[in-house]
Each structure stands twice: as C-alpha cells, then as structure tokens.
Amino acid sequence: MMLIRKSPEILYSEVTPKADYLDRRKFMKGAMATGLLASSVAGVSRLIDPGTEVFADTKLSTVKSPLSTTGEDLTSYQDITHYNNFYEFGTDKGDPARNAGSLKTRPWVVSIEGLVNKPQKIDIDSLMKLHPLEERVYRFRCVEAWSMVIPWVGYSLSELIKQVDPKPEAKYVQFLSLADPSQMPQMRESSISWPYSEGLRMDEAMHPLTLLTFGLYGETLPNQDGAPVRIIVPWKYGFKSAKSIVKIKFVAKQPETTWNDLASNEYGFYSNVNPNVDHPRWSQKTERRIGASLFKQRRTTLMFNGYGDQVASLYNGMDLKKYF
Ligand code: MTE
C-alpha cells in the first residue's frame, strides 16, 4: 500500500487557495469555450494539464454542523484533490487526479443489504436527499502520517441506518467500493483483491461523527476523492474511509477489509488514530499537516485524532494496543 511506493513530496510545494483555484477553473471553462485548449498553443497546453483537472462542480446546499472541528486552517482544495489514495486509479498520490476522470458517477445505485428489515437499492440522488446535507469540518489523518483539515458535505450515516432498520444480529457494517476495470483500468496494476472493502462495528457506524459523504468545499465530491459517495470516520486512519461505495452490507461477523487482508500486522480492523501504537515501519507520534507553513507542518498526533471526548467510550475496556 502506502508502503509499496514512496510518494513524491513535491506535490505539496504549491498551495493554491480555493478562490484562486476556482478562478483558474473559470479560465479553463472560458478557454474551452473559445477553443483555446483545443488549439495547439504550446504555452497553454504546458500550463494546463487537462488530465489533472478532474472536477465535480455541482454546488450543494448545506447547513453548518455543530459537529465541525473549529480553530484549524482548512487544507486547500488543490491539495485535497491532488494528493490522494485511490488505488483503483493508481498508486501514486497524483494518479487519482490524473486518472479518475473515467469514473462515471451517474447513474449510480447503492445497494443496502444483508441483515436489515428494509433492504434497498437507492439511487444516489435520492440518497443525497434522505437528510439535509451538512458541512462538517474534520481533521483527516492518514496512516502514512500526514493529515489535512477538510470541509466535507454529508449527513450522519446513522440517518440512513435508521431507515433500513438493521436486525438485532447485525453487528458490523461493510462498505464495498465500485470495482470496474473498464472505468478503473489501473486496478489491474496492483495485487489488491478488489473490490475495496472496509467495515465498522455497528456502534461506530451509528456514531453521529461517522459521515456519509457526498461533497467537499460545498460541491459534489471530485472523482478522485471518492465520488459520488464515501464514508468519513474522523477518528480513524484514512483507509477506513471507503470511496465510491456501491454496497453497504450489514453482517454478523467482522468483515474482511482490504488493508487488514493485505498486511494484518500493519493495518488492524479498528485503526483508531493512536499515537501510542507505532506502525511496524514508522512512528505514529507525529504527523505532517499537508500545505501548512513550514513551522506548523509537523505536529503531535492526538489520540483518536482529537475526537476522544466523543468516541473514547466506544472502546471502554478494550486493549487498544491489541485491537489496533
Ligand atoms: N477507497 C477506495 N475505494 N480505494 C482506495 O484506495 N484508499 C483509502 C481511503 N479509501 C482507498 C479508499 C486510503 S488509504 C486513504 S488514506 C483515503 O481513502 C484517502 O482519501 P483521500 O484521497 O480523499 O485523501
């Protein structure tokens, strides 16, 4: 994973504020309209690499959430959309932005199945309307020891779970991503056994912080960030947050999960952000805040990524070194 290839650090050398970025997009659209991009003006085609411009620009109407993290600088849209892990589109951090344009996010149906009284296949546009969309700012911490602060858009997964009425035997929820080599040709390049799978214990899935996520920065998710729907679990390492979900399955036993399956000694099922449990090959005590100024880049990693007040009680009595 995260381990096989080292990511190029230079991707972070340039931070573009969201406003500048949007201006650039306007310019791009204007350029397209006037045929500028189609022409072979050498300077322009060097400046704009269309392959890295994968956007979803549908505005979403949102309400502010009281569950937002406050007092932290937001990571720029540029960084959030150009430093990604989405192995279906390649293993380098810049690959998803370059390659995810081939993902078709409409029509899109999410199948909710398994141990529920009301299984259903929900069209993505209906799913988005199931509950008012909130803007929720969360810290996002990757197991690779970098972090961001992201204004996600979505609603608590618990709202959906209540609607499908799980049976008492349902103890875990499994999330399965799309696995379609015709849209994700780079899937074939890695040895991961697709589809990407992640899971949560039922109480974790029901926790109000667990966000069914449709957007960021007030717009639908760009493909590289997991369009059209993903999970965000802010107190766990980023890999728990499955992207481009097509199936949500309620099960009795702990489901197999992609990274745990690949290297169970390195990636546990729980994967709570825990600075006291080092990854076998690196420390988890600190993290690098992507895009932050040099002085603010390196910071101490907080237990449960700083969400301990809200989630620590879920793990009362558990040995979090054993259940890492
Ligand atoms: N979901 C799918 N389907 N495929 C992936 O490769 N990578 C995971 C997670 N969800 C991944 C995925 C990992 S390792 C991380 S750190 C986060 O997505 C990255 O999310 P981001 O690119 O939006 O930062």
Image (cartoon, rainbow, N blue to C red):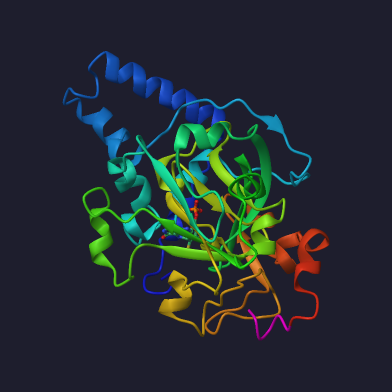
Determine the residue positioned at 62% across, 57% down.
233
Q: Residue furthest right?
A: 309
Determine the residue positioned at 36% across, 50% down.
96
| Quarter location, residue 188 | bottom left
Q: Nearer the viewer, residue 313 or 271?
A: 313
Q: Residue furthest front?
A: 117
Q: Residue 154: image x %, image y %?
A: 60, 40
Residue 287 in view: yes
Determine the residue positioned at 55% across, 61% down.
238
Type of secondary structure dominating the magenta stretch = loop
Point out the stretch of residues depicted in magenta.
319-324
Q: Residue 254: image x %, image y %?
A: 55, 74
**321 falls in the magenta region:** yes
For residue 228, above or below residue 42: below
Which image quarter holds the C terminus?
bottom right
Q: Nearer the viewer, residue 144 or 127?
A: 127
